[in-house]
Image (spheres, helix red, strand yellow):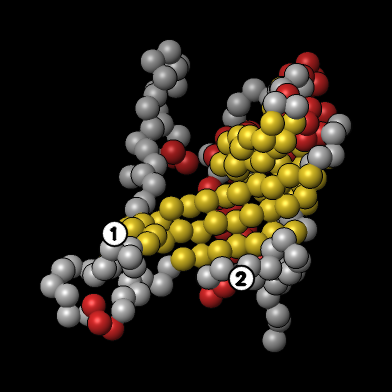
Amino acid sequence: MTTKPQLSRTSRTQLKKAAHKVSLEVEHLYQTIDASNIAHIAINDKRGPSVIPMLAWREDDNIFIHGAKNSPMIRYLKSGANTCLTFTLFDGWVLARSAFHHSAHYRCAMVFGQFTTVEDNAEKSRLLDIFIDHIAPGRSKEVRTSSERELTATELLVMPLAEASLKISDRGVNDDIADMDHDVWAGVLPYHTQIGPAITDSKSQVKRVPDYLNLE
């Protein structure tokens, strides 16, 4: 029997609060990161602490972000500073019989580490194509490829998924026994992200929506 890869425990990823919500399965971590699209990234530069949302994507065991070379955040991260990324998916409200036990369904990944820079333009182009295909599978083969000037002006940073934790809340209503006869509806109100329908650019010469965007 093949054992599924598990997340390693460190002093920063060992969760004590609501430990029953912890998932150590690497595949669950991948699914959360791939579905979230947005990473909230912590920095603490000369302006003080801040958390900045950035588009992010994964390939294998690495997280990638990109931005302009003159971005203060990019300059801070490429210096090798320690940081933390969070990826959060909100899945619904849990409506209990008491105010105290109302809660939420969610998936939240935290990744700790340091970014390094991808310098080679050919590798940048390959990795950015992976990002485009994550948005719309197959699109990288249709669009104009990035020029050398564009690739040189873009900073691409990578962080290994070496230290991460994942918390999943999905267990429904957890009422006290004393409240079970309270005359009020209880249950879960799911939330779903709606994708599409696609809106064609008014100046587009191609009016037919590509099959990979036809989600109806």
| Label disc, if present, on residue 189 of the rendered structure | 1
Mark carried by residue 88: none
Q: Earlier in the sequence, mark 1 or mark 2?
A: 2
Query: Crowdedness of circle 2 by 10 Å Cα count: few (<14), some, many (20+)?
Result: few
Residue depicted at 69% across the width and 47% down the height = 84
Residue 152 vs residue 29, the one in the foreground: 29
Label 2, on which residue? 16
Judge the density around disc 1: few (<14), some (14-19), many (≥20) Cα neighbours within 10 Å. Answer: few
Does the rendering let one see residue 133? no
Coordinates of residue 56 in the picture (x, y in percent): 63, 41
Q: Amino acid at mark 2?
A: Lys
Q: Is residue 38 left or right of residue 190?
A: right
Amino acid carrying label 1: it is Leu
Between 109 and 25, the one lying in front of the other is 109
Residue 201 is at least partly visible in this image: yes
Q: Residue at x 63, y 67 (%)?
A: 15
Secondary structure of the residue carrying numbered label 2:
loop
